[in-house]
Each structure stands twice: as structure tokens, then as C-alpha cells.
Image (cartoon, rainbow, N blue to C red):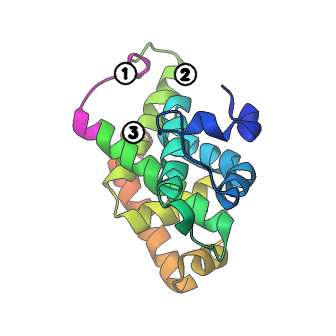
């Protein structure tokens, strides 16, 4: 089922859970932010199935809190960060599993090279400290400025700039083969 069709189908996300009442607050949050969670996860994992898993994980965690669903100071920021962290968990788990999906096989075309690069970037992001991966994702995948990220994460703008710079340097080293030696 496509994400856009989920607006009225929150219960399908929780299909594995025993029949439970979904708090109105959670349903409103799902309707408002499910697409954001899916897009954010898809950018990191590179595939829809993993993005669906992230979507389910993020909202399932909140559902399991029951009536204690927290009040969010900034819901959008919370859901973006939750999606980033859950997506990185999936990438790390896949890396630890050491399995190779059929889509990972290089077929010589530019699409295969693009997929290979995307997967290499996902693996490299999974090796980063969680906060660094989150900041890099917010900056380069979601297009937030350093000042916006500083407000979201609760650190100084200067520290964001330092983390972005160091993370880019680290990723350049790890992805040197894909960047044509431009490290």
C-alpha cells in the first residue's frame, strides 16, 4: 500500500499488534507526519520496504506508550529525528547481517552504480556516531540550514558546522572509490 493511501489506514501500520484502541493524539500525529517519516527513512535506507518498517517502528513505539503518548514541543522535528534514528538502526542491522540483496548486484548500468553508491553511503552513515549521522542527514538530505539544525538538536550553530565539516571529511574518505578519488 502506498504511503499516500495510509492517511485513513493507521490500523494497517499496527497489523501485528493485538486489537488496541489508538489514542486520538497518536492518530492525529500519524495523519500529519507519516509521509515525513516515510520520506526521511527512504532517503537513508534507499528502499520502500525498509522505509515502511521505519514508519511502523516509529509509530508502534508511540502506540506502546499507551495513554502516555508524550506532548511534543516540535512534532515535525521529533518525527524526523525518530525516522533518522530508526532508519540508521535498520541499515546497521542489515550491515551486521551481511546479507546481499538482489538489487545490490552490479549490472553495469548507471542505475546500478547509483544504487551501489546509495548503499555505500547508507553503510558509511551507519558507521557514524548517531548525532553526527542525524546532523548530516538533516543538512544534506532534508536541506536544513546549520542554524535550523542547531535549534532542532539543541546545540550551537558553530558546533553544527564543525560536525558537518568533519562528517563530510570522514564520508569522503570512506566513499573515495565512488567519488573517483576526490577525497
Crowding at label 1, few (<14), some or many (≥20) Cα neighbours within 10 Å?
A: few
Q: Does 106 appear in magenta? A: no
Instruction: Classify residue 28 as left or right of residue 73.
Output: right
Q: Which residues are magenta?
A: 95-104
Q: Can residue 70 be spotted in the picture?
A: yes
Q: Secondary structure at mark 3?
A: helix
Instruction: Classify residue 22 as left or right of residue 87.
Output: right
Q: Residue at x 55, y 51 (%)?
A: 59
Q: Is residue 73 above or below residue 9?
A: below
The residue tagged 1 is 101
Q: Residue at x 52, y 16 (%)?
A: 109
Q: Residue at x 55, y 44 (%)?
A: 55
The residue tagged 2 is 110
Label 3 or label 1, whichever lies nearer to me, is 1
Q: How many marks?
A: 3
Crowding at label 3, few (<14), some or many (≥20) Cα neighbours within 10 Å?
A: some
Label 1 or label 2, whichever lies nearer to me, is 1
**Percent position of residue 93, x then y:** 30, 42
Q: Secondary structure at mark 1?
A: loop
Q: Secondary structure at mark 2?
A: helix
**Percent position of residue 124, x then y:** 36, 48
Q: Sequence order check: which comes first, mark 3 or mark 1?
A: 1
Real-space Cα separation, disc 3 to disc 1, in angstroms: 13 Å
Residue 120's disc number: 3
Is the magenta region chiefly helix, strand or loop? helix
Amino acid at each position: 500500500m502506498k504511503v499516500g493511501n495510509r492517511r485513513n489506514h493507521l490500523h494497517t501500520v499496527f497489523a501485528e499488534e493485538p486489537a488496541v484502541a489508538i489514542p486520538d493524539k497518536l492518530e492525529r500525529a500519524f495523519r500529519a507526519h507519516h509521509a515525513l517519516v516515510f520520506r526521511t527513512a527512504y532517503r537513508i535506507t534507499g528502499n520502500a520496504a525498509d522505509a515502511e518498517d521505519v514508519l511502523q517502528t516509529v509509530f508502534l513505539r508511540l502506540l506502546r506508550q499507551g495513554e502516555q503518548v508524550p506532548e511534543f514541543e516540535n512534532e515535525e522535528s521529533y518525527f524526523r529525528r525518530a525516522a533518522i534514528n530508526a532508519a540508521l538502526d535498520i541499515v546497521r542491522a542489515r550491515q551486521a547481517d551481511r546479507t546481499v540483496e538482489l538489487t545490490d548486484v552490479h549490472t553495469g548500468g548507471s542505475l546500478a552504480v547509483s544504487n551501489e553508491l546509495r548503499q555505500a553511503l547508507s553503510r558509511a552513515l551507519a558507521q557514524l556516531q548517531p548525532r553526527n549521522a542525524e546532523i548530516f542527514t538533516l543538512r544534506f538530505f532534508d536541506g536544513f540550514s546549520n542554524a535550523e539544525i542547531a535549534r532542532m538538536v539543541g546545540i550551537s550553530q558553530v558546533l553544527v558546522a564543525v560536525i558537518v565539516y568533519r562528517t563530510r571529511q570522514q564520508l569522503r574518505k570512506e566513499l573515495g572509490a565512488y567519488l573517483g578519488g576526490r577525497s
